[in-house]
Every structure is written in C-alpha cells, then in structure tokens.
Image: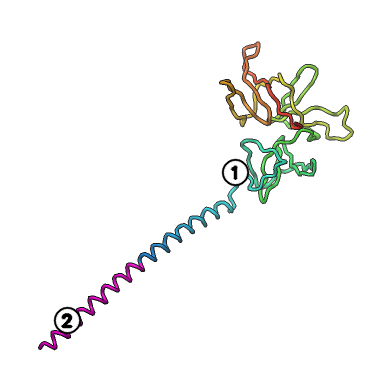
Amino acid sequence: MKTIYRITGIILILVSFLGTDTIQAQRNEGKRNRGTSTHRDYDTKRSVRTNHYRGDRYRTQPIHRNPHYRYPRHHRVIRTLPRHHVRVVYRGLPYFYHAGVYYTIYNDVYATVLPPVGFRITVLPVGYTRVIVGPSIYYYHSGVYYADTSESASDDQKYEVTQPPVGTLLRTIHEDAEEVVIDGKIFYDYNDILYKRVSTFDGNTAYEVVHVHNENK
C-alpha cells in the first residue's frame, strides 16, 4: 500500500513539474509571438507608407527637385501634357508651355514651374493684362511679366519673360501669392516679387510692386 502511495506521489510531482514547464513554455511562446506580431505590424505600416508614396498617386512635389527650376508655392502636377503644348529648351533645361502655364518633367509626372527671366515665347497667353509703366509696356499673366522684344529679336520668339519695375500697379495678383508680414505691415510675395495693397485715385484696390528680387545677384 505504501508503495502505491509513493508511486502516486511521484506521478503527481511529475505532472506538476511538467505542467509548470508547459505553462512557462506557452508564456515564452506567447511573448515571442507578441514580439513577432509587433515587428510585423511595423513592417506592414512601413510597407503601406512606401506603397502609398511610390504608387500611382500624384505627388504634391517632385522627389528630386532640380535647383535650377523655380517652383510656385502651390504648384500642381499632371500626368499628361495638354494638347498643342510647346517644348522649349532654355539653358539646357526642357520646359513645356501651354496657355501661359509652364511644366517640367520628373519621373512619370509633369510639375508646374515658373519660367526664368530671359525665357521667350512666340504668342502671349490668352487673358493677359497690358500694364503701362511710364514709357514701357508689359504683359502680365499668371504671375509672369513679358516684354515685347520684336524690335531687337531676330527670331519669332519675341515675348521675353522679364521683371517689372518698382511701382508697377496691378488690379489683381496671382491667387497663390503668399501673405507675409514685415514690420507689422502685410505684403504679398509671388514669383520673387513683393506687392503691397494700395487704394487708387478712383477708390479701387490695386497691388503695387515694392520689391523685385534680382536673379543676377
């Protein structure tokens, strides 16, 4: 009888010991699984962000920006250029022009850019504004000023991108002009040109050029 009790006791001890090891092993496995699960969740999130970034969705701006191109503050991107666009190479850089808007290509999209001073086109965009400053005449469209160089130019591209003189007045400025505060006064900055809002003699609102950034400096 004592022998039976001893055997039963040994069996109970073994069962208890094995059960503890099994529970501990399950806990360890659970920890390993939780660690693996967390790592996978992180990788999955990274993968989702990567796919979203590299997918077919349009980017808000090109990844590799060429410092020689000048981008408007809120430039947009398109996948296909408009029909009848014109391709112009200026200082070794390709531009695509259509209806007063300029583009350059990055990867699989076309991003809007601002044309540099000296860039020339053949025909002014529809909807331009004629601006008279003293003896000079400028043509304004989408934040860009043009000068007629037909008297001095020998080719067909007679309208040249230029900068307006200080004091130039516009009825309206580009909708993407950035509001800035200098010495407590509000100005509007667009395409390296600083404007201030003024009242004209007839009581209307206009925007006066008060500073022009010189690209040659």
Question: Could you tell whether 14 is left or right of 201 in the image?
Answer: left
- Marks 2/1: CA–CA distance: 74 Å
The numbered disc on residue 60 is: 1
Binning the other alpha carbons within 10 Å of mark 1 as few (below 14), some (14 to 19) or many (20 upward) gives few
- The quadrant of the image that shows the N terminus is bottom left
Quadrant of residue 207 within the rendered picture: top right
Q: Quadrant of residue 14?
A: bottom left
User: Which residue lies most toward the left here?
Assistant: 1
Circle on res. 135: none
Name the residue rendered at 68%, 27% in the picture: 193
112 vs 94, left or right, is: left
Closer mark to the observer between disc 2 and disc 1 = 2
Q: Is residue 48 above or below residue 160?
A: below
Residue depicted at 45% across the width and 58% down the height: 41
| Residue 155 image position (x, y, % from top left) | 87, 35
Query: In the image, which disc is placed on residue 9?
Result: 2
Q: Regarding mark 2 in the picture, which secondary structure is present there?
A: helix
Number of marks drawn: 2
SS assignment at label 1? loop
Task: Return the x and y of residue 156 as percentages of the image width and height.
Answer: 85, 35
Decide: is 8 above or below 80.
below
* Residue 3 position in % (x across, y down): 13, 88
- Residue kind at label 2, given as amino acid type: Gly
- Of the 4 image quadrants, the one containing the C terminus is top right
Horizontal side of residue 89 vs 17, given as left or right: right
Q: Residues within 10 Å of mark 2 (few under 14, many from 20)?
A: few
Residues in magenta, as a range = 1-29
